[in-house]
Amino acid sequence: ILSSIETFEKEKELWHVVLKLCLALLNHKAIKFDRDISRKSLADEVLQERSDLEREVAGILNEMCEKINRQEAHFTSVVVEPFVELLLLNHQPDIQDTAHRIFKSLLYHEFVTTQSIVKISGQTVDCFCSVSKKDGIPHDHFTGSIVPMLQQIFEGPSVDKRIKDTATFQKAGVSLLRDLTELVQLLSQLEQIPDGIEWEDEKTIATFGLMEFFKRTNKQGPYISYIHQLVNQHESANRMAEAALSLMLHAELLSYSDEMLPELQQFPAQTSFERKRNLMMRAIDFFEKGKDWERAIDLLNQMGDLYKARYDYQRVAEGLRMQAKLYENIITKERYLAEHFRVIFYGSGFPPTLRNREFIYRGFECERITAFISRMMSRFPRALQLPSNEAVPDSVINGDGQWLVIATVYPSSEDEMNRRRIEIDRKIPKFIRNYQRGRDLKVFTYSRPFRKSQTKSDNEFKDMWTMQYFLQVAQAFPSTQSRSEVIIRKEVELSPIETAIDAIRTKNSQVLDLVAFHKDPDNQGANINTLTLALNGVIDAEVNGGTKKYQEAFFSDAFKQQNPDRLQNIIELKEALLESIPILADGLTVHRNKCPENLQALQDKLETFYERMKTTIAATCT
């Protein structure tokens, strides 16, 4: 074979087989021997035979290297990846030297021919990825052997004389070395993450980091490969919406044309339209399983428009039937929205990617704070949990250990963050409004009541300040990841009168939603306990002096004189109290029509107290 190098084109497949065979011989796993003394001679004998075989194969490779130096153009597409794999996996000096010389020769040839090393760089990156998945890349070998080798090729004094533009060649080499160093770091991070559901977040984030690298460096093959790895991770963790959104990253690379695409990984040769359609249909399936029926409908609408343009009415009809089923799911099936949790990692015991940084995590469906805390503590067993409502001392922030702050946060919006009041369209059912509030969610909130005065007054409303915290994340939920870093943090201090306004508006909104729910003919048999508790809570507070306490705290001449900047707040508080009157009246009517006999006495009491409340509010607020 070696003597017939001139007929390489005719024997290309055979050359490939020979190279693969050499590679397999040189990289096969070391034989494990019983180290019993009685068998030591046998082990030595077999090891000697293996050493002789490696030397013989290395000799063949050396001879191939000489041929390649004369016929580089024939070999580039065949030998790059096998010899990069040899560089990574076989650490024998003579074999490393042979692989080094072949790789250098191929780099020189491509640059002389094309003034770039784009092709070999891409093949090298592909090989690093495939080796990482099969065997892992030894970080010490990369930094101690591969990096110096590349530096010698691109920066050493023995650069091939055929290369005239050494500055461009060296610049390309610096770029390749930088990319490979970043790639090895990202691959190592992924390799080191243990298996288990508690590490699911770290795996998806590490995978997404690789995807971002491949996207930035225009390596579409590995980018698509890791998209599907991310999809599989989300599917295994039962994060179906995230799996669908990850899958759409691949679909978005494709057009709706009839251009033929070659076979790729698990995909057969097919048109761009067919591959994109198949990806979208799988994404629709994921959205349906994840109860994100609205997004599934959006994709079906997109596909329906395309089928109409192609006059494929059979598929249009199929899509409409699927949409009908999804709309039925929206109005008939129970859907529990995911909780969200704030996590801050304090201490140098955490890696730099986490240390002293704040994230929002999207929990699993119905996951509560206790289960989430258990999951986080399993991941970081040495960490100590800190109270979420206390200041963190510098000794923790700059300490050597690991500390976690974990707390529940709630959906919000930029309007709420900027204190802009939102008018709620109650024609939209609450379960749909809840879904819309949780879709493309970027802002979260939590609050903490506090007192500014150490002395407690006789009127609790005078002292009730609230610190409201708003957190905006880098990437809206749901997304391709289950966590997102907080990039904007805003604190809004609410005075006692603003706290009172928010409290009354919240109660009014709650009663309005309950009344609308129980008025719906589909909910006639629903339990009214929640409505009972809501009405009793508002009216009972009034019995205990609610409006009178508001009057004493905020409507007095003394308050107006001491707080001239709060006149608008006084108007808003009175409006909120007046708005509660017709809302409660409607609620009591619905409650009377539905309450069982054992609640009739409570109904009568609530109506009596409501009349007193109405009179008091009218006298105070008009």
Image (cartoon, rainbow, N blue to C red):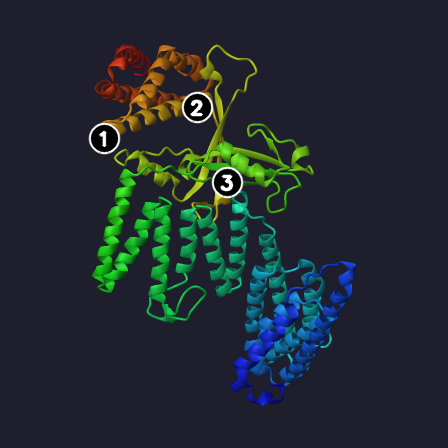
Q: Looking at the image, do the residues carrying marks 1 and 3 touch, with CB atoms under 8 Å apart?
A: no
Which residue in the protein does label 3 denote? 360
Q: Nearer the viewer, mark 3 or mark 2?
A: 3
Q: Is residue 469 above or below residue 198?
A: above
Q: Is residue 229 above or below residue 608?
A: below
On the question of residue 172 being in view, the answer is no
Which residue in the protein does label 2 denote? 499
| Neighbourhood count class around disc 3 (C-alpha, 10 Å): few under 14, some 14–19, many 20 upward | many
Q: What's under tag 3, amino acid-wise?
A: Ile
Give the mark nearer the N terminus: 1 vs 3: 3
Of 546 and 160, nearer the camera is 160
Question: Is 545 on the left or on the right of 333, as rendered?
Answer: right
Q: What whole-number distance in Å separates the C-alpha atoms at marks 3 and 2?
A: 26 Å
Q: Nearer the viewer, mark 1 or mark 2?
A: 1
Query: Where residue 389 appears, x then y in whole percent?
Result: 55, 28
Q: What whole-number distance in Å separates the C-alpha atoms at marks 1 and 3?
A: 36 Å
Q: What whole-number distance in Å separates the C-alpha atoms at marks 1 and 2?
A: 32 Å
Query: Where residue 458 appears, x then y in whole percent?
Result: 48, 10
Secondary structure, mark 1, is loop
Which residue in the protein does label 1 denote? 520
Q: Residue at position x 31%, y 11% from top?
A: 616
Give the mark nearer the N terminus: 3 vs 2: 3
Query: Where residue 541 appears, x then y in whole percent?
Result: 37, 14
